[in-house]
Image (tube, coloured by chain):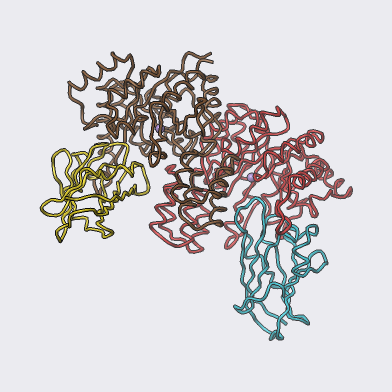
Chain colours: A red, B brown, C cyan, D yellow
Amino acid sequence: MSLNIKRAVSLYSYQEEFFLRKMSLEDCIAAAATTGATGIELVGEQSVPGCPKLPSDAFVDQWFGWMDKYKVTPVAHDMFLDYNKKKGHYWTDDEAVESFKQDIRFAHKLGFKIIRVIVNTTPQIIEKVLPFAEDHDIILGIEVHAPWNINSAWMAKHWEVMEKTGTKHFGFIPDMGGFTRRLPRVQIERMIRNGADPEIAKFVCEQHEKGIMAEYTIFEVSRMSNRRIDMAVAELSRHNTYVNPLSLVPHIDRIVHIHGKCLEMLEDYTEYSIPYKEVIDVLKKYGYNGYIATEYEGNRHIQDIYEVDSVEQVRRHQVMLERMINV
Amino acid sequence: MSLNIKRAVSLYSYQEEFFLRKMSLEDCIAAAATTGATGIELVGEQSVPGCPKLPSDAFVDQWFGWMDKYKVTPVAHDMFLDYNKKKGHYWTDDEAVESFKQDIRFAHKLGFKIIRVIVNTTPQIIEKVLPFAEDHDIILGIEVHAPWNINSAWMAKHWEVMEKTGTKHFGFIPDMGGFTRRLPRVQIERMIRNGADPEIAKFVCEQHEKGIMAEYTIFEVSRMSNRRIDMAVAELSRHNTYVNPLSLVPHIDRIVHIHGKCLEMLEDYTEYSIPYKEVIDVLKKYGYNGYIATEYEGNRHIQDIYEVDSVEQVRRHQVMLERMINV
Amino acid sequence: MYEKYMIVPEKAKKNEKGFEIGVRLPYYRGVSLSMVEEIEVSLDGETLPQNAVNITVNDKTYNLEQRENETNDRWEMGDIATLSIETPDDLPEGEHTIGLKINLRIGYMPFPSIRVDEKKLIFH
Amino acid sequence: MYEKYMIVPEKAKKNEKGFEIGVRLPYYRGVSLSMVEEIEVSLDGETLPQNAVNITVNDKTYNLEQRENETNDRWEMGDIATLSIETPDDLPEGEHTIGLKINLRIGYMPFPSIRVDEKKLIFH
Ligand SMILES: [Mn+2]
Ligand SMILES: [Mn+2]
């Protein structure tokens, strides 16, 4: 039994209701707290108008008021680097560092201890911004998002920065979507609604579950169909990767936070695509002791015809986490 | 200082000279022994006419005679599964198992203790053939060849068989080509000779060294050129993968053998593409104690205009291994 | 993502130079206006020139060139912007089919982020 | 792989029905004849029908159908097979350009393994 893994909710999970103004920021925080999660993750540019400009003192007061009222803690802020924000101009390293610093100031002001670093951030940028992060007591975590895995070449370059600097302020944030053993059913069905061939989709799902490398599947599908939508189905297998959860083990002390991605939480409190129990067993066995933050992302695949109920999806995910953590 | 990693040579390394009948099988064994390697790996279907038919007693006697004469040991035999050997017919599992068994008999007869299992072999086939391998005291090792890595979905499926059966007769054989940090120069230059754009090739090499995911590079090259040869250069980055050598750590006790792939051994006893020292340091630190078998494969990329000297390439690789192992 | 929410039917109306529609950004966060690479509106199947499209967010109106250069002002997630589109001829009252394509320049995406919506709207 | 070694110039000669050439398998191991998916020979730029090509390995000769069904007899690595090709007309003596494409069916390769060679050969 591990009491060390903690539960958080990324308010990203409620994006459908927030987008449609069915839930306010406070509603999102309240919903998260109701699940028993004790931490809050925030995509600043989603939830806080003007971000990464520093929020007003009034907003900051209200924010911490909410934290107290709902008994939750700010855990992580998700940043972006818009290298090509200006048309025709690609940011210099200095410009990127300046943008990054602003996110650090933003996160610091709202009490976050961790920043989720977007995957296109170069190791050089991180090295340059590290002292500033350390000064602000912010831990940076590069998001390990499918199709990357924690040992991918790109992540190895970031790992070299961790090794070289010996810093305690830079690590990995694996997104559980990197353990997609079955292709997400909601995504497949959406593509069939959009015209994909159901037989080809079935074939792709079977190949994926067998662990067949996506290149083979894509090649075979290219011989079955010349329709773009069918190729897009085949390419799902390339983007929604599965790797052995043991891949995390050599880096366990460098995992600073985890994204609990979910696209379809079933009534029995399992996720359709991701074998959570197996990953969490590895995390427990090797002593991970940070947060797992629910990141529900199924809305985009069902919103065309179904009513999205993010609150229920997050609730189920938190029940699942709670049970697995405390077994 | 580790005395546990042992050195072997796969006679595959001398394929150019063997193909051209410049070296006989005995010459290959002798050349391997001259390097100080103590183990021999063999692609049976390359070196022994009729393989996987059982060799004659006369051949077997001669084989062991050579082993004694050159003071080397048979280490590994590399098998294939020709699922589509017969046109229009795809092998049933039973047919595949029968073919596999024949390779086990072949390997056993020549004193090999390990069989390199080709990567297209399904986990189901291996499960079915395992008792036969155990009876013949043969350890099976699935080759972890780029673009797979030891944590890939397909390898995780094989790992499940290892876990489920608890067998000591099935593990992994990583091929060092899975740590291709720089794209092989000999391969790039060959493609430029075949018409690839040198500027695009340079760009692809730079992206690869930065650890950029191949999909990005392929996409960018597709906007620079619509020539197949240029796309083929971009795709080198997808096929010649690099992963963090730490990826091996959780599986170190399941690594039964290693392929010491090399495409270009330099005069200073380094391989142009693969950071051997970093991988071997991991192997030593975590206690790998099997063989590393030199597998020189550069001939195919230079044979169009250069004289291939496999003997010298293997010699350099063995010198490199010897120095790294015994530091 | 968010395709069906892009065009907000209730906001459609005629104005002095053409017509206007309400539009939401098809993305899960806000972006600076400069990151909106393309806004393409079609009327009854006919694509209108992009420089005929002005956008109003946070009570400020931007033409194409101003939008492309606006790296500060943001189109926030879920906010309904107003697109006002100049038409050469007066728009006949009643129902029209409006198509909308929005293309965003997102730094971490190697490919353009293009999303489309189409709705029949009533204009008065 | 091994492209330039495929056609063995010294073995070229005319015979009663056409001509023959020596050929090595462009692969790093031997294969059963059934795995040779295609052998395509061209003469001075003109592709000859595949069923005009017989192959001799290990002193046995196979026509196209026999080759496709031969799962035992093997074309070993580095061995020089003889291809004898029937031509409709008598081949004029002297130099001709011979093209060769060999396509192998290899179980672990998702794509066909196609390799080509072309040489000018002297026929007597
Ligand atoms: Mn995530
Ligand atoms: Mn190998």
Residue at far left of view? D16
Q: Residue at x 65, y 36 (%)?
A: A158
> Is B172 situated left or right of B127 in this image?
right
The picture places residue B5, in percent across and down from the top left corner, at 46, 18
The picture places residue A137, in percent across and down from the top left corner, at 79, 34
Rendered-image quarter of ligand 2: top left
Judge whether C82 appears above or below B264 on screen: below
Judge whether C99 appears above or below B314 on screen: below
Q: Nearer the viewer, residue B10 or B16?
A: B16
> In the picture, residue A143 is in which quadrant?
top right
- Quarter of the image containing the N terminus of chain C? bottom right
| Residue B172 visible, this angle | no
- Quarter of the image containing the C terminus of chain C? bottom right
Q: Nearer the viewer, residue B33 or B110?
A: B33
Question: So how many labels did they put on this image?
Answer: 0
Q: Nearer the viewer, residue A275 or C47?
A: C47
The picture places residue A49, in percent across and down from the top left corner, at 79, 55
Q: Nearer the viewer, residue C1 or B213?
A: B213
Judge whether B150 appears above or below A51 on screen: above
> Is B58 situated left or right of C47 in this image?
left
The picture places residue B129, in percent across and down from the top left corner, at 30, 31
| Residue B283 visible, this angle | yes
> In the picture, residue B294 is in which quadrant?
top left
> Is C59 situated left or right of C79 in this image?
right
> Is A68 situated left or right of A199 in this image?
right
Residue at far right of view? A57
